[in-house]
Image: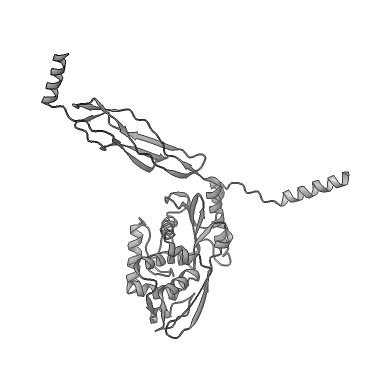
Amino acid sequence: MKKIVSMIIIILLTICSCLEVSAPIKADEIDTLYARSACLVDGSNGRVLYEKDGYKEMPMASTTKIMTCIVTLEQAKLDDVVTISKNAARQPDVQLNVNTGEQYCLKDLLYSLMLESHNDAAVAIAEHVGGSVEGFADLMNQKAKELGCEHTNFVTPNGLDADGHYTTAVELAEIARYAIQNKTFIGITNTPSWSFKEITKGRGFTVTNKDKFLYLYDGAIGVKTGFTGKAGYCFVGAVKKPDRTLISVVLACGWPPNKNYKWSDTKKLMNYGVNNYTLKEVFEADKDFQPVMVEDGKKNSVRVVMDSASLEMLLREDEKIQVVYSLPDKLEAPVEKKCVVGKASYYLGNTLIQQYPIYTVEEVERVDYLWYLEKVFDLFLF
């Protein structure tokens, strides 16, 4: 009997020793990333949860194609016919191997672009949508400015090394955050494989998704790999959970033969976001404000309120939201109903997160001669 008990204990200890303990990853542990530049962003609001040289201008290789794809989806029709130019057909490195004069459906070229990162497809798309590579780059840069990306500049649609072609990890995350809100974009980037034919001669192709992260992490929804000799290995990842969406970027994340560094860095960033942040409701509901005094009004004060709302944020345990209410000591009559007279400001540290208006719920008329006369008459009757 003792031998049996001993054997059971040994087996249990062996099983326990084999179990991987998933302890929360701390920010100082993330600092061991291979990537020279990296960030993790809350997909719901763009808040940077972590960054390592995340605001440094860097080359970004084929992660450029995130912008190429989203600009194309917004500027062209998926059933457009694209004719291949000599310039597109001679693009180097990763290729679909299109030929000059061939014709393809734009939708098929987008799958080629995002699943296998074909550089010739990128140029063919750019020339079709923008009239030229330079014209398409203008569209890309215009979109970047619309998204508030002041340290991003596109020269090529494929991300091949070029002077003046750069972004930052944080701004690239913002571009990806915008792109993944497009259902067609997500549909393309999450497709395992896609088969299509050239229109005129029927030459057939099948492209397969090279984004291994889709199969490495629960909830992964993309987004794009990249590599050039100048940029190193790059990857933009996205994870969608029931209570959050996280976007990560790693740039210059090793060079050959270390192509797997980008996956380990991305998983570490995502684990940090999943394990250390909790979605919390931070809106102060049912705030009861004191009435605001009114000078020269038919009423001495006016009631003010703030609409009920919902403000949820991913927060670490050590992060607290501070609410600052701004209201005047008094108002001058007349006061209109629904007049905004103050605001509630929500801060995380020194960063303003959100503001809500505080407004009056009734009007207060200004006193006049007739009003005083009525008061005197009431006193006389009394």
Occupied quadrant, residue 160: bottom left
Horizontal and vertical percent position of residue 266 = 54, 57
Is 200 or 130 nearer to us in this picture?
Answer: 200
Q: Is residue 82 above or below residue 14?
A: below
Occupied quadrant, residue 305: top left
Q: Is residue 27 above or below residue 221?
A: above
Q: Is residue 356 above or below residue 122?
A: above
Occupied quadrant, residue 172: bottom left
Horizontal and vertical percent position of residue 200 = 42, 85
Asked if residue 307 can be seen in this view, the reply is: yes
Colouring mode (rainbow / by chain / secondary structure / one colour): one colour
Q: Residue at x 54, y 53 (%)?
A: 270
Q: Is residue 51 left or right of residue 212?
A: left
Horizontal and vertical percent position of residue 219 = 54, 56
Is 24 or 311 nearer to us in this picture?
Answer: 311
Query: Quadrant location of the C terminus?
Result: top left
- Residue sitting farthest toward the front: 381
Asked if residue 230 can be seen in this view, the reply is: no
Q: Residue at x 27, y 31 (%)?
A: 328
